[in-house]
Image: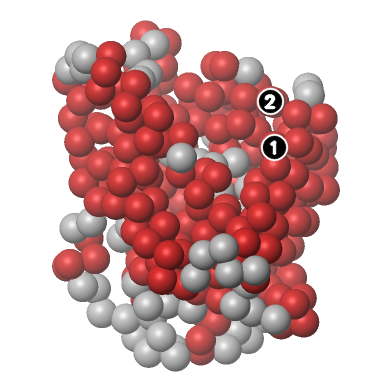
Amino acid sequence: MDYNSIFNQILMLFILMIVGYVARKINIFDDKVNKGFSDIILKITLPAMIIGSMVGNNDPNLAEQFGKILLISLSVYAITFILAIILPRLIKSRPFEKGIFEFAIMFSNVGFMGYPVTAAVFGEEGVFYTAIFNLPFNLLVFTIGLIFLSSKQGQKTKINPKLLINPGVIAVLIGFIIFSLKIPLPKAITGSLDLLGSVTTPLSMIVIGGLLAKVSINKIFSNYRVYLISIFRLFLVPMIVYFTLRNFVDGVYLLGVPVLLSSMPVAANSAILAEEYKGNAELASQTVFISTLFSIISIPLITMFFIA
C-alpha cells in the first residue's frame, strides 16, 4: 500500500488551495472572477466530470457488481444523513453554522480526492468501484446537500423544486442513461468530457483558496466547532461506517472502498455550492481547509487500522 502516494495526493490539493489564497490576496483575481470560476465548475466542468466518469466505465465485472455497490453506497449515505442531523446538534452549532456542518458530515470529498486516493490504495479496480459508489453522491449533493447549504439562520428550509433541476442532477441522469443503455460515444466526445472534467479539481481548490482569502487567518483557525466537525468527519464517520458494514459486507473492495471514501475530508464543492446558493461560503471554506489539513494524518491512520 503506497502511503507516500496518499500523502502526496492530499498535499497537492492543499497546495492548490494555498495558491488560490495567495492569488486572491495579491489581487491576481477579484471576487467577481472567483464567482465566475465557481459558475464554470458547477455548470461546465463538474457536469462533464460526472458524465465522463459514468460513460467511461464498461468493465463487465463492474456491471456485475453494480447493484451491490450502489446498495452499499445508499446505505452509507443513510448512515451519514443520520449523523449529519445528530452531530451538529451535539456540539451546539449556532444557527448560521448548522446547515454547513450538516453538509460537512454527510458529504466527503469522494470525487476530487476519492479517485486518486482510492487508486493509490486499491489500484485500478478500486477506481471502478469508486465510480459506481459515487453515483448517489452527485444526486444527493444537488438535492439534500443544497437544502442543507441554503438554510439560513436556523430557519426551516422549504424544498425548492428549482434546486432539484440543476446541471449536477441533469449530468447524473444523462450519464446514467448512457451507462445503462451502453450508448457508444465518439472518442472526440469522451475525450472532451475527460479534458473538461480534469479542470474541476485544480480550479475548485483555487476557488476555495480565493474564498478563504476573504477570511482573516485568526478566524480560519479560531472556531473550535470546525475542529470538532473535522474530527467527526475524518475519524468518527469512517469508523461507524466500518463497524456497521462489516456485519453485512465481506471483501476487500466492497468494505474497503466505502470506508476509505467515508474518511475523506469535507467535500470541496461545499464552499462553491454555498457561494452559488447564498449559503455561508466562508464557513464552508474553513471546514474544507481544516479537514483537508487534518486528513494528511487521518487518512493514512484509517487506512492502516481499518483497511490494510
Lower sequence index among marks 1 and 2 = 1
Check residue 209 in the rendering and tell me which mark sits there, or answer none: none
Rendered image quadrant of residue 55 = top left
Mark 1 lies on residue: 9
Identify which residue is drawn at 44% across, 90% down.
Answer: 153
- Residue 80 seen from this side: no
Mark 2 lies on residue: 120
Q: Tag 1: residue type?
A: Gln
The C terminus - image quarter: top right
Which label lies toward us, 1 or 2? 1
Residue 278: percent from left, percent from top: 37, 78
Identify which residue is drawn at 82% across, 34% down.
Answer: 304
Query: Viewed as shown, does residue 100 lie left or right of 139?
Result: right
In space, the residues marked 1 and 2 are separated at their CA atoms by 9 Å
255 or 211, nearer to the observer: 211
Residue 96: percent from left, percent from top: 51, 86
Q: Secondary structure at mark 1?
A: helix
- Residue 197 seen from this side: yes
Decide: few, some or many residues near mark 1? Use Cα within 10 Å; few <14, some 14-19, many ≥20. Answer: some
Find the residue positioned furthest to the top.
60
